[in-house]
Amino acid sequence: MWGLSGSETSKGFLDNTMSSHVHLAACRYDEFAFEDPSAENMVRGAFTRDLVRILYQEKDLTKITYSALLHLLPALEHQHPQCSGKNKGRILFKGLTGTHPMAFRLFVDDGRYFAEAGDVHGVVKGTLFAIHAYRNSMSTGPEIGILEADVVYARFCRLGGGGEIRRFKFYLAQERRY
């Protein structure tokens, strides 16, 4: 494969065993990581763009290891992603992807809906949120609608309906201002 490290540890790390974590790097120590010029209004590297795309596209992440993940990425010009660490052969996220529903708090500000989920949570413009009727944050109750992230900030996003927004009747703890 195109320059993936084998069993050696990336040059420059003090703890060569790296038993506490797995290190995914956009490039080798003697290369530069390049930005994605097509990223819409945000700074995002080419490696991050491809990594996020793979994580969203893969149907079953419960059998993919950290090191195998890099083999799924398309080749990048002038940079060679690296995977290092004692546990690089472990399954991504301990195999727990998709098994636990994620719930985010919804709030209203000046008549617009927002979710307490943003860029740091992996939300991008176009991410869909299912709105449920119950107050319980882990509700699997009836879905009353779908809203789409139309503006994404670091820790929250503004939601729209992709056109007309239907006003939902649901519990909101408080109106919040940022």
Image (cartoon, grey):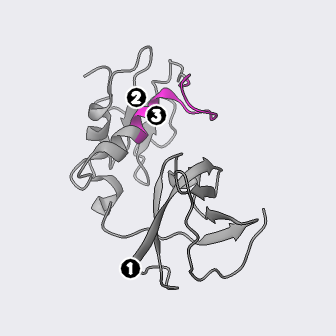
- Circle 2 or circle 1, nearest the eye: 1
SS assignment at label 1: loop
Quadrant of res 71: top left
* Placement of 148 over or under 26, stated as above or below: below
Q: Earlier in the sequence, mark 2 or mark 3?
A: 3
Amino acid at circle 2? Pro
SS assignment at label 2: loop
For the magenta stretch, what is the residue range? 35-52
Q: Earlier in the sequence, mark 2 or mark 1?
A: 2
Q: Tell me the crowding category of disc 2: few under 14, some 14 to 19, or many 20 or more residues within 10 angstroms, Cα based.
A: many
Q: Residue at x 48, y 81 (%)?
A: 133
Q: Which residue is mark 2?
A: 81
Q: Earlier in the sequence, mark 3 or mark 1?
A: 3
Q: Tell me the crowding category of disc 3: few under 14, some 14 to 19, or many 20 or more residues within 10 angstroms, Cα based.
A: some
Amino acid at circle 3? Arg
Q: Which residue is mark 3?
A: 49
Q: Which residue is mark 1?
A: 142
